[in-house]
Image: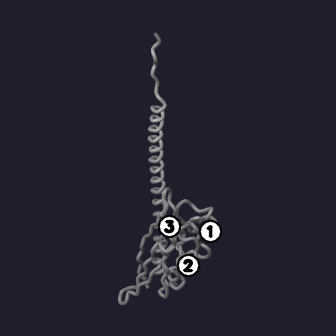
């Protein structure tokens, strides 16, 4: 008499493959999210260094003006113009996007952190450009180029106190794994040294 051997049915095999597939896909999704979070953390650190360099360049320009023999020729005189404030870039009005061209931030500027001077010429490049870095930064190779980072200025008349300038250093870039751009800014208040 021949005994019948019972094997796995097709339903049991499909159920096992489905469970294994769900576990494998879930593990890959979690690994991908972890990789994106690590990339974003690295980008935030790099952008924070870029913002700090811009803040130090602003402070250097102010201090150089205070000790200059000809203060009217200093960088501070150029960036601290009380007659105008920069028009802030509104990302909500731009559809929660980063500025695409210098017209979006036309009255803004950037500092050359190597020399403590204001950048001249065509310094702004879109963060969407072909040669753009993955995060907001200022490049010094082949001329000064800013990708997704800029400085906005606001003047406040101090009356009896020294005049104050609020410099908002802004950064905007498309980070890994996010559908909206990542934005950072820092406010630096400096007083007129004259």
Q: Which residue is mark 2?
A: 106
Q: Is residue 27 above or below residue 187?
A: above
Q: Would you say the residues marked 3 and 1 are in contact, meaning their CB atoms lie under 8 Å apart? A: no
Closest to the observer: 72 or 125? 125
Q: Picture coordinates of residue 16 (x, y %)? A: 45, 34
Residue 89 appears at what percent x and percent y?
49, 75
Quadrant into which the C terminus falls: bottom left
Is 16 located above or below residue 160 in the figure?
A: above
Q: Which residue is mark 3?
A: 172
The crowding category of the residue bearing disc 2, from other C-alpha atoms within 10 Å (few below 14, some 14 to 19, many at least 20), is some
Local secondary structure at mark 2? loop
Q: Position of residue 124 (x, y in %)?
A: 58, 71
Residue at 46 percent of width and 37 percent of height: 20
Place residue 59 in its image quadrant. bottom left
Labels 2 and 1 touching (C-beta < 8 A):
no
**Residue at the image point whose x is 46% and y is 27% from the top:** 8
- For the residues labelled 3 and 1, the Cα–Cα distance comes to 21 Å
Looking at the rendered structure, the secondary structure element under dot 1 is loop
- Taking the view exactly as shown, the residue that stands out farthest to the left is 160
31 up-or-down from 192: above or below: above
Q: Residue at x 35, y 89 (%)?
A: 160
The residue shown at (58%, 68%) is 126
Q: CA distance from mark 2 to mark 1?
A: 19 Å
The part of the image, by quadrant, that contains residue 63 is bottom left
- Between discs 3 and 1, the one toward the N terminus: 1
The residue singled out by tag 1 in the image is 143
């Amino acid at each position: 008499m021949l005994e019948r051997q019972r094997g796995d049915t097709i339903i049991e095999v499909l159920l096992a493959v489905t469970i294994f597939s769900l576990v494998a896909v879930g593990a890959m999704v979690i690994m991908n999210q972890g990789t994106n979070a690590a990339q974003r953390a690295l980008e935030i650190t790099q952008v924070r260094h870029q913002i700090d360099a811009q803040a130090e360049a602003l402070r250097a320009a102010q201090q150089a003006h205070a000790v200059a023999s000809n203060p009217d020729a200093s960088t501070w005189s150029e960036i601290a113009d009380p007659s105008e404030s920069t028009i802030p870039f509104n990302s909500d009005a731009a559809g929660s996007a980063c500025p695409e061209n210098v017209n979006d931030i036309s009255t803004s500027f950037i500092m050359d952190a190597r020399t403590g001077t204001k950048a001249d010429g065509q310094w702004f490049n879109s963060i969407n450009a072909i040669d753009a870095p993955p995060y907001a930064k200022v490049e010094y190779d082949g001329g000064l180029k800013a990708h997704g980072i800029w400085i906005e200025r606001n003047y406040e008349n101090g009356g009896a106190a020294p005049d104050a300038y609020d410099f908002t250093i802004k950064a905007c870039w498309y980070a890994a794994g996010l559908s909206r751009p990542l934005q950072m800014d820092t406010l630096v208040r400096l007083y007129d040294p004259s």
